[in-house]
Amino acid sequence: MRLKRNLLSIVIIVVSIVGTVFAFINYQMETGETAHINSNRQTENPSYSSVAEDFEEFLVDRSNNKDDVSNVSHTQIEYDFDQVQRHRKTHLNGACDRLNQTRTLPRVSPASTFHFIISDKFKFLFCFVPKIACTTWKGIMIQLYHNQVGPTKKRFVKLDEIGSPEKVKKRWQNYKKVVFVREPLARVLSAYLNKLRDGDKKIQTKWERRFGAQIANIARKDDTHKRRNSDFTFVEFIKFILKLGPDIKLDSMKDHWLPYSSFTHPCRIQYDYIGHFETLAYDGPTIIKKLGVEDVVQFPEVHSSAAVDGQQTEYAKVPIDLILKLQEYYKMDYELFGYSKEESLKLVLGNRTTSDIGAYLHR
C-alpha cells in the first residue's frame, strides 16, 4: 500500500512538472506585452535630475506596475527573430541613406551618452527610451551589474559616467548595442497618462510644477484656466508639444515625448538588436538569450498597457488635424523605424468613420 502511495505521488509530481512546462511554452508562443521606465532627472548641466530622484521614480513605477506594455498579436505563433532583425536593420540603413543622415559616431557629450547603460561583463550597451519598456530593462541592467560587482547601492553604470571619449567610442564600436522603439502615437499617449493624469501623484505634481505654466499659456485661452496649472487634457499636452517643437534641448523629462530618433542616434550607431515594443514578448526574451545572460536574468512577464487599451478612446477626443500634426512631429521616428503613418492613423481612429479617415489620408 505504501509503495502504491509513493508511486501515485511521483505520478502527480511528474504531471505537475509537465503542466508547468506546457504552460511556459504556451506563454512564450501566445503572450505579448511588458514594461517600461520613467527616468526623470531635472538638474543643471546637462539638466538631468539627481540619481536619488531618478531612483525614487523608478521604484514608484516598479511598485505601481506602471510599466506599460505592447499590443503584441496573440495569434502570431511563428516569429523568426533573426529574419525580423535583418528586415528592421535593412530598413533603417536604407532610410538613413535616403534621408542623407550622417553615419559617423556622435560626438561624445553628456547628451549623446546619457541614455546608454553599460554591461562591461557581458559587453553590451542598452539605449533606454522612456515609455518603451524602460523600467523592465533598467531592472535587468541592475541585476546584471550586481552580478558583476556584488551587492551595492549603485544601480548600474551609464556611458556618460565613463569620462574618457576614447573609452566611450570603444564601447560604441565593440560592444553589442540594443534599442527598443515604439509606435510614436502610442508612446506619447503613454507619457501623458503616466505623468499628467493616471500616474503617481507625487510625480504628476513634479511635472505640473515643471511644465504646468507653459502648457496652460500655450493651450488654454481664457485667463481663469491659464492660472490653474493642473488637470491637463491630452489635447492640451499635444498642443504644448507641437508648440515647443522637436528641436528643444533634451533633458530627462522632455525625453519622455521627444522623438527617440533624436537621442538614440540610429544612423550613427550600428545597433545589433532593434526591438519593437509591439513585439516585446518575443524580442525581449530572445535578446536576453542572444546576449548570453539568460543564466543570470530572465525577461519578466508581460502585462497589458493602459495606453494601448485606451488608445482609440483617448484619440477620439483629439481633432484629426492635430493627430496629423503630431505624426509630422514624429516624422523621423516613423521613417527610420518603419512604422506606417497610415496604419497608425487607422488604429487610433478606429471609432471614427472610414470616410473621415480616407478624407484625411488622401487630401
Image (spheres, helix red, strand yellow):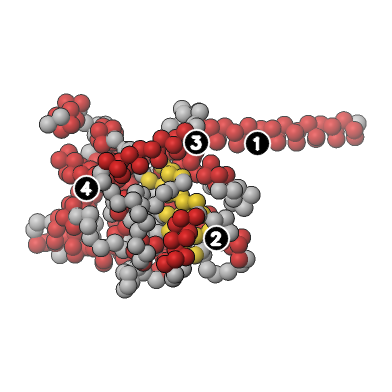
At mark 3, the secondary structure is helix
- On the question of residue 254 being in view, the answer is yes
Q: Which percent across, then down, holds residue 191?
A: 32, 52
For the residues labelled 3 and 4, the Cα–Cα distance comes to 31 Å
Residue sitting at 39 percent across and 71 percent down? 50
Q: Which residue is mark 3?
A: 82
Which of the 4 image quarters holds residue 229? Answer: bottom left
Q: Which residue is mark 2?
A: 120
Mark 1 vs 2: CB contact within 8 A: no
Q: Which percent across, then down, holds residue 361?
A: 18, 31
Q: Amino acid at mark 3?
A: Asp
| 74 left or right, relative to 12 | left
Among the two numbered marks 2 and 3 on one chain, the one whose residue lies closer to the N terminus: 3
Q: Which residue is mark 1?
A: 20
> In the rendered image, which quarter contains the N terminus?
top right
Q: Nearer the viewer, residue 302 or 328?
A: 328
